[in-house]
Image (spheres, helix red, strand yellow):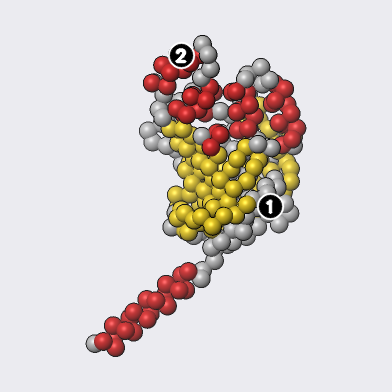
Amino acid sequence: MKQIISTIFALLLLCTVKAQDVFITKGKIEYEKKINLHKTIDGMADGEDRAWLESFKKVTPQTYTAYFDLSFNDDKTLYKPGRDVTPPQRVNDWLVGPANENIVYSDLDKHQNIALKKVYDNTFLIDDSIRNINWRITMDTRTIAGFECRKAVGIIMDSVYVIAFYTDQIIPSGGPESFTGLPGMILGIAIPRLNTTWFATKLELIDVKPESLVAPKKGKKITNKELQVQLKEAMKDWGKNGTRNAWLSGI
């Protein structure tokens, strides 16, 4: 009897070790995007507007939630809106911000990024190289969607601080939106200045066909730098909200 128990234990241990040694190259990840609307409103409050914004906050849900899917196969990824939130959320578009339903195609091997972004009444097709983020990897870890992830920090758009969590068990160095460049898949992103986070909720081990990873094609062609210049000029009189909207569009 003891020998049988020992054999079963040994087999279970072997299976555990093998499971840990599995490295994933294709599948679909669901991300939950959350925006803390109350903190966003607090950041807008200034002078005479403060009283009105405080009353507006009372009728606004604290958090806005959306879901996105990232399909990947080796060096190619496609990020796009996922399932709807039930029940539907009633939140003003100006509070959520522009470029909130992006479709982003990345060819990690060619260092190419093609993104479809809707910024108010305009639809842009941003064909550019993948953004280079000087990540600093730390020793901190966090478990996300069942994977132990390592924390990294970086800066985008000159001054916006980004916190990322990645796992080296998922090989492609992709992530939500246009975030890439770590030694494994990014499963979590937090941008404190935008009160916004993206965290993976699950991974589906499905056979993603290369032909299903197709870049968007519609929209006014532009580079990310050109878009930022246009938005900053168009929103120069918008104050804090204009700066925030430019950052949101550049993610």
Q: Is residue 203 visible?
A: no
Report which residue position mark 2 lands on.
Answer: 52
Vertical side of 30 occupied by 9: above or below? below
- CA distance for labels 1 and 2: 46 Å
* SS at mark 1 in the image: strand
Residue under the point 38% across and 21% down: 58
The residue that appears at 69% across and 26% down in the rendered structure is: 231
From the viewer's perspective, is residue 157 above or below residue 119? below
Q: Is residue 202 left or right of residue 78?
A: left
Residue 130 image position (x, y, % from top left): 70, 47
- Point out residue 54 in the picture as x, y percentages from the top left corner: 43, 18
x and y percent of residue 164 in the render? Answer: 56, 48
Which residue was labeled with disc 1? 107
Residue at 47% x, 54% y is 142
Q: Nearer the viewer, residue 13 or 163?
A: 163
**Disc nearer the start of the sequence (1/2):** 2
The N terminus lies in which quarter of the figure?
bottom left
Q: Nearer the viewer, mark 1 or mark 2?
A: 2
